[in-house]
Structure formats: structure tokens, C-alpha cells
Image: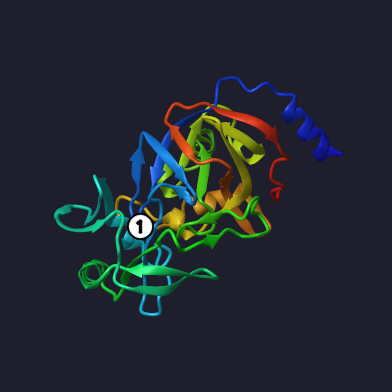
């Protein structure tokens, strides 16, 4: 009964101010630096170019900042039809790859429990990344023909994704980060959580209550809360790691033995979304059940 009253109290509350997109980000290579965008085109598997590349080890298994926090120091940039990667503080030493590569043969690569086909990018790129990370690794690319499906327990229409952890989009409200930072001794920036979409307006963790919403005529659905990992404890400017903000998040955002922050998003139509676009909530759902 208490839960029902709490939900009714929320739905009867008038939240002032329009919800609107404040930031958009793309991460061309999984676990490397992101790029802020003014507008983004939604493709069949997320924002265009998002996590279409990935670094893998000798066994063709994915590498991330979880094991190699120094990956945060490798920055990306897109110019015309070229993706450039450089190490922070050393923009002269860089590697360039075609945004639409032909590749050097295919290989099966592993992302968590998924195995999918990828193009190999060749010795020059492999050597450059291996030297920067001080371990043998290879750069691979997901071609259009490679279809990696999202978890069928949450899929709405057999959606696919790139080399993201599980879903094509991640969205977080700025008010949610503000709430977290009010509890931290040292505030953290949004890049700790690597979202694709950030919105302003509304209450903290309002994204938890969104089921169906629209941006620029595109129907989007919050299908699964995002469980957070140690990457959130890596300073994206320095590569240094600590206990926060995961320690504080765990104190009030834990459920089912997982720490939640942000929502994984699926969508129906392809199209373009732009900073400043209004986010219109069509249908809400009950908020997360978190441990007291």
C-alpha cells in the first residue's frame, strides 16, 4: 500500500519546466574517449559511428576501461570520412582510419556473451594501439552485415546494437547527476557515465519513470536501467581510479545487488535528434525498486 501511495504522489506532482536534450555524445571506439555532438543521426544500431570499432586481445575478446583504465586517455575525433585517434597530450602521434573501412579480412570477436563478425583493421593500427596500451591488441570494425541483437528479454522489435555493452542508447538526466554530486565531496562530470543522451528539466532520476517518450517525432523506450561498473570510478581526464562515485551511488541506488544510474534506450524510427530538442513523455512506468 505504501508503494502505491508513493507512486500516486509522484504521478500527481506537476514537474515544472520542459525536458530537453542538453548534450549528445558518440563513442566511435568502445571504451575510448567520446565526442560531443550538436546533433546525431540515429541509425539501425545507435548513433551513427557509435561503438562501431573495438579493441580486442589475442583471443579476440573485447577490451575496456574496466581492466585498462588508460584507455580513457585515447581520444577520438571525426573529420570528413576519417576517424582520428590520439593520446591525450600528444596530438602529433595519431592514427587515422576510414570511417567506412573495407578491412583486412573478417574475424569472430566476443563482447560479453555475444560473438559477432568484425573486420580487421590491419597491422599499422594494431601496432599503434598495442604500443599505447602496452599490450598486444587489435582494432576491429563492425560492418553493416554484422547484426548483433539486443537481449531478447528487453527487445521490442529484434533491435540490434554495435559494440556497446548491450543497448544502442544510454540516457541520463542532468538532475540525476546533480543529485549524486550533492552527496559527493568532489563532484564528478557526466563523462564518468558515458551516456549518449543527456537531458535537462524534471526531477532527479526522472528517466527511471519514463516508459515511452518522443524526440523530434522519434518514439523511444526506456527498457532497462543501466547497471554501473568500475568504469565510473575512472577519471576520464587522467585515467586515475578511485572508489567514487560508485561507493556513494551504491548507498542509495542499489537493487538486485546492482548499482543503477541511467536508462538503456530502444527506439522505432531512424532520424536526427538535436541539442535543444524537446523530450516529450508519452507513457510513464513505476520507478525502480531500490534497497532502503
Q: How is the image coloured?
A: rainbow
Residue farthest to the bottom, as pictured = 59
Residue 63 visible? The answer is yes
Q: Is residue 216 above or below residue 29?
A: above
The residue under the point 27% across, 47% down is 78
Q: Which residue bears the numbered disc 1?
A: 29
Quadrant where the N terminus lies?
top right
Residue 185 visible? The answer is no
For the image shown, how many numbered marks are present on the structure?
1
Task: Place residue 62 in its image quadrant.
Answer: bottom left
The residue under the point 42% across, 35% down is 23
The residue under the point 47% across, 48% down is 46
Q: Is residue 125 above or below residue 285?
A: below
167 vs 238, left or right, is: right
Between 32 and 243, the one lying in front of the other is 32
Q: Is residue 151 above or below residue 199?
A: below
- Give the structural element (helix, strand or loop) at label 1: loop
Q: Is residue 7 above or below residue 96?
A: above
80 vs 167, left or right, is: left
Between 181 and 34, the one lying in front of the other is 34
In percent of width and height, residue 12 lies at: 75, 24
In percent of width and height, residue 190 lies at: 43, 42
In percent of width and height, residue 167 lies at: 54, 54
The residue under the point 52% across, 42% down is 171
- Classify mark 1: residues with Cα within 10 Å, few (<14), some (14-19) or many (20+): many
Residue farthest to the right, as pictured = 1
182 vs 15, left or right, is: left
Between 277 and 45, the one lying in front of the other is 45
In percent of width and height, residue 257 lies at: 65, 60
Amino acid at each position: 500500500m505504501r508503494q502505491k501511495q508513493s507512486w500516486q504522489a509522484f504521478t500527481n506532482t506537476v514537474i515544472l519546466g520542459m525536458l530537453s536534450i542538453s548534450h549528445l555524445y558518440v563513442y566511435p571506439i568502445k571504451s575510448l574517449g567520446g565526442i560531443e555532438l550538436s546533433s546525431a543521426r540515429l541509425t539501425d544500431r545507435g548513433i551513427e559511428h557509435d561503438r562501431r570499432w573495438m579493441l580486442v586481445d589475442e583471443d579476440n575478446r573485447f577490451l575496456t576501461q574496466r581492466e585498462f583504465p588508460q584507455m580513457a586517455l585515447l581520444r577520438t575525433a571525426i573529420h570528413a570520412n576519417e576517424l582520428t585517434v590520439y593520446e591525450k597530450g600528444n596530438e602529433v602521434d595519431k592514427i587515422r582510419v576510414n570511417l567506412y573501412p573495407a578491412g583486412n579480412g573478417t574475424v569472430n570477436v566476443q563482447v560479453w556473451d555475444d560473438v559477432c563478425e568484425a573486420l580487421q583493421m590491419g597491422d599499422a593500427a594494431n601496432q599503434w594501439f598495442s604500443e599505447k596500451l602496452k599490450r598486444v591488441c587489435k582494432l576491429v570494425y563492425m560492418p553493416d552485415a554484422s547484426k548483433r541483437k539486443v537481449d531478447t528479454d528487453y527487445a521490442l522489435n529484434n533491435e540490434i546494437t554495435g559494440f556497446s555493452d548491450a543497448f544502442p542508447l544510454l540516457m541520463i538526466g542532468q538532475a540525476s547527476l546533480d543529485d549524486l554530486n550533492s552527496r559527493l565531496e568532489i563532484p564528478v562530470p557526466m563523462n564518468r557515465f558515458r551516456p549518449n543522451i543527456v537531458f535537462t528539466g524534471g526531477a532527479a532520476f526522472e528517466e527511471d519513470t519514463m516508459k515511452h517518450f518522443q524526440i523530434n517525432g522519434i518514439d523511444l523506450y526506456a527498457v532497462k536501467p543501466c547497471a554501473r561498473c568500475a568504469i565510473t570510478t575512472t577519471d576520464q581526464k587522467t585515467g586515475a581510479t578511485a572508489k567514487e562515485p560508485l561507493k556513494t551511488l551504491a548507498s542509495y541506488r542499489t537493487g538486485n545487488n546492482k548499482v543503477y544510474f541511467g536508462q538503456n534506450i530502444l527506439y522505432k524510427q531512424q532520424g536526427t535528434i538535436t541539442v535543444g530538442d524537446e523530450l516529450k513523455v508519452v507513457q510513464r512506468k513505476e520507478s525502480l525498486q531500490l534497497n532502503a
